Image (cartoon, helix red, strand yellow):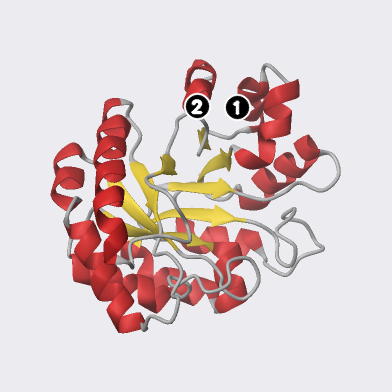
Amino acid sequence: MGSIKQSVTFWPIGRLAASTPDYAARLAAIGFVAVEMAPENQWPAIRAAGLAIPIFGGHGSLGDGLNKRENHDRIERELRANISKAAANGIPSLIVFSGNRRGQGDDEGVAICAEGLRRVIRQAEDEGVTLCMELLNSRVDHPDYQCDRTPWGVRLCEAVGSPRCKLLYDIYHMQIMEGDLIRTIRNNIRYIGHFHTAGNPGRHNLDDQQEIHYPAVMRAIASTDYDGYVGHEFGPVGDPWEALRQAYEACHVGD
C-alpha cells in the first residue's frame, strides 16, 4: 500500500496565513507536503517551507466554463498562459470547469467541453501539465453545474483522449451526488488526477460528526497506483489548526 500525499487548499487557511507568518512551516510540521490554489504571492513562502504547489485554477469561471463555445477563445488564452506558468514553476496540474448547464444536454456538454480542451491539450502534453476537470455537486453548493457525476467526467476524458486530461474527484461533492465512493474511485482511478476532501454534511471538519469514513477511502486510494495529491478543502470548525491536524490523521494511511 502506498502513502497519501496530503495537501491543504489555501482558501480555508487564508485567515491562518494572514495571522500566522510561519503557517507553511506549521503545516509541514503536521505532515502536509503541499499547499494548493494559493495566490502567486504566497508561492515563495510555501516553497521556503519545503512544500509543493500541486494545482491551481486554470481559467475563469466555474459557472461560465468550457461547455459554451462562446467561452472557448477566452478560456484558451487563459489556459495557454497558465499551462506555461505551471510548467515554469513545477506545478503539475490545473483545474478546469465545465460551467453550468443552462438547459444544455449532457451529450452536447461533453462534446463541447472536449472540443475546448482539445484546443490546448497538445500544449499541456508538451509541457507536462495535467488539466483536471472538477467534479462538483449540483444539489447543494453549485446548482446547475454540469460536471456533477463521475460518468460524465469519464466520458469527457475519453472524448479528449489524452493522459493529460483527468478529473479532480472531490470526495465531498461526490458523496452528495453519488455515494459509493470506494467502488467508484477504484473503477475510475486511471481518470483521476487529483482529490479533494471535506466532511459531509456542511463541508467542514473530517471528524465523527460527518458521514464519510475517510480512513477507508484513503486506504482504497493508497491501494491503487495513484501517485498524486489529496487536498483538504473545507471550512474548519473550532480551532482551525486542530481541524487540520485531525484531517491529516484521518487521511494518514500507508507508508
Which quadrant holds residue 219? Answer: bottom right
Label placed on residue 28: 1
Instruction: Tell me the distance, in whole angstroms, between the alpha carbons under discs 1 and 2.
Output: 7 Å
Lower sequence index among marks 1 and 2: 1
Are there few (<14), some (14-19), or many (20+) residues within 10 Å of tag 2? many
Q: Kindly identify the residue that appears in the image at 23 percent across and 71 percent down.
A: 158
Check disc 1 and report its element: helix, strand or loop.
Answer: helix
Residue 147 in percent (x, y) is at 43, 70
Residue 77 in percent (x, y) is at 25, 43
Q: Is residue 221 visible?
A: yes
Q: Kindly identify the residue that appears in the image at 31 percent across and 58 percent down.
A: 71
Q: Name the residue beneath numbered marker 2.
A: 51
Q: Is residue 33 left or right of residue 204?
A: left
Which quadrant holds residue 45? Answer: top right
Residue 255 in percent (x, y) is at 51, 44
Q: Kindly identify the residue that appears in the image at 37 percent across and 76 percent down.
A: 152
Q: Kindly identify the residue that appears in the image at 68 percent across and 16 percent down.
A: 21
Task: Verify CB contact (< 8 Å) between mark 1 and mark 2.
Answer: yes
Are there few (<14), some (14-19), or many (20+) residues within 10 Å of tag 1? some
Q: Is residue 20 left or right of residue 91?
A: right
Quarter containing the N terminus: bottom left
User: Which residue lies most toward the front here?
Assistant: 70
Check disc 2 and report its element: helix, strand or loop.
Answer: loop
